[in-house]
Image (cartoon, rainbow, N blue to C red):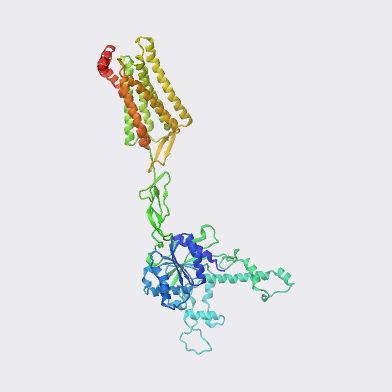
Amino acid sequence: MAPNEAHQYTGIMQLLLQFGWTWVGLLAVDNDSGEHFLKTMEPLLSKNGICLALTGRIPNRADWNTLGDFNDLLSNIYLPFTDRKCNTFILYGESRTLVRLIILMFLGDSGYKNNTSLRKVWIITAQVDFTLTGVQRGCDFQFFHGAISFSIHSNYLKGFQKFLQILKPCYTEENQFLKDFWEQVFDCLCPDPRAPEEFNEACTGEEKLEHLPEPFFEMHITGHSYSIYNAVYAIGYALHYMYSSRSSLRATGHGKIFELQDFQPWQLHPFLHSILFNNSAGELVSFNGNKEVESGFDIINLVTFPNKSFKRLKIGSLDPDSLGSNKFIIHEDMIVWQRNLNQMVPLSLCNDYCYPGYQKKKREGEKFCCYDCVPCPEGKISDQKGMDDCFKCPEDQYPSKEHDRCIPKKISFLSYEEPLGIGLALVAITFSLVTALVLGTFIKHKNTPIVKANNRDITYTLLVALLLCFLSSLLFLGQPRKVSCFLQQSAFGIIFSVAISCVLGKTMTVFLAFMVTKPGSCTRKWLGKRLANSIVLFCSIIQVGICTIWLGTSPPFPNFDKQSMAEEIIAECNEGSVVLFYIVLGYMGLLSIISLTVAFFARKLPDSFNEAKFITFSMLIFCSVWLTFVPTYLSTKGKYMVAMEIFSILASSTGLLVCIFSPKCYLILLRPELNKREQLISWTHSRISGPSYK
């Protein structure tokens, strides 16, 4: 009729895990049941990650024969109590086990009541019953103040207290046991009519059980009594069912009417197994497949008082037959702890918890519950106490400096609102306006010799391309979007290819013009216009074709790089096809090298309108910028990589604009008198060509 003891072991494990107690002591009475308890609990504790600080056996006797026995008891049981790390002890035994334990504490330290290091949290099994009768009346149970005890489940029974209130066993002859009990709890003797009245301690008949302190007698039914109550009713129901089976009984006994003495005890078992009834407390009583009653345990908190009394407070329950989280219930706010703990949940660990930012490191040669706390490695955190291992933050977060929490990463991109973005945007807009002014100037003076030199249409095309180069850098500012990513690299590649093709066309015009021996021939005119236009168109179409394939097969797209930067998420444009991206850059580099080579060889050709020298300088700047750009671009991340690309676009475009067009603007705006064919030939020979043309 009592619940299975194995459920109690499970409840103890859940209680230890609930409060994080991993360094505990086991004390059991020194007999067969105590030995079974220790053998069952030790592997169960280890399985749940709980270490044993000590295992002690309390003698099942009240005397010690030798001094050696006494010293062994002190060293094996009393001394471990001084370990301040172990604040939780599990006690298994019986009522007399408590008395012997208190005696041991007294022998070890007569002032044990005031020794705070001996005040522990006791977890006591249901086999131990706190009753102050007989020799236990002289014991002070304040040592067990705040204990958490498992008790067989009980419930309120209607009429039970009324029954206790009308009891007067000294004046009835119904029950000798009740008389003995009455004399013991009230410390009096029941009157005996056959004996002379010479005892002052005779019971008066006015004694009432409700006047007794609760430790001596409880007016509500205890777990053990509740089990007996259910057992009596189970037997009654079983007998009733057995007698009710008249048809089967008569068939067996040929119509004979059976009396109670005709049955054997074993014949009652099948009826007991199928018993199912509600008792007077309204609880269902039944048995499971193992012929065990389907019941659980109450979790009790013991509160003691200076007058040697105590009170039991129900703080939870353990019901293995319940579903979900109702199997184990405990109300932490109701628990009264040891007085020296200041109502704080005590720690019972081999060492203190590792604080957030640290992880456990096992100590060699010690139990697994003993460890050192070491800081989390770089890139990992621990955000709770007592964590075994640190862990990495999600991709969109990074560890704090203390490694105790994850901080959301900021999205990083080159914004128009930050100083670097504002500066680059202003430079791009300024040079765009300058280029537009130069273009306007050339259109206004389109009929002058300096403008007509080396193919006026290509000059306009080059200026428009440079204008678009400056403006294209603005596509790289701001958070990458689908449209901006789609246009960035392709627009940059095509526009720059057009600009370099124009430079190459102008240079080839100068170079091939001197290959013709007749300066006034039609061939020279064809070379000056048709060839340059063909070069620009052909070279640009190739780059347009490459970009079309790129955008059609694997175009760039917005992407968030969460890995490259520790504290930032880089909002970037993924190139899509890296191979085609580098083909675009490589083709642009090839055009640049060809233009530089041709311009270099044509830089000293004796012509009045020869601008190859200035093209050479511009292409040197252009190639230097982009040769520096490649390794720098590959070694930087985030917005600084974008800023480097914008800077390279602006620097190379500025080099072309200044080196090619500043000498012409100087002649057009500041020396208009020289912008004539006769004067320009003379000025060119003296200022530009120098002695090398002579």
| Front position in the image: 160 or 455 | 455
Residue 677 is left or right of residue 161, and the answer is left
Q: How many marks?
A: 0
| Front position in the image: 388 or 186 | 388
Determine if residue 140 is in view.
no
Q: Position of residue 647 (x, y in %)?
A: 34, 31
Residue 359 is left or right of residue 193, and the answer is left
Q: Quadrant of the C terminus?
A: top left
Q: Residue 650 falls in which quadrant of the image?
A: top left
The residue drawn where x is 30% and y is 20% is 613
Q: Position of residue 255 (x, y in %)?
A: 74, 72
In the rendered image, the residue lying farthest to the bottom is 196
Vertical side of 59 occupied by 483: above or below: above
The residue drawn where x is 36% and y is 22% is 595
Vertical side of 393 occupied by 645: above or below: above
Determine if residue 540 is in view.
yes
In the rendered image, the residue lying farthest to the right is 254
Q: Position of residue 270 (x, y in %)?
A: 65, 67
Vertical side of 131 occupied by 528: above or below: above
The residue drawn where x is 43% and y is 54% is 388
Q: Quadrant of the N terminus?
A: bottom right
Residue 204 is left or right of residue 261, and the answer is left
| Front position in the image: 69 or 539 | 69
Vertical side of 13 occupied by 674: above or below: above
| Front position in the image: 257 or 658 | 658
Q: Position of residue 553 (x, y in %)?
A: 48, 30
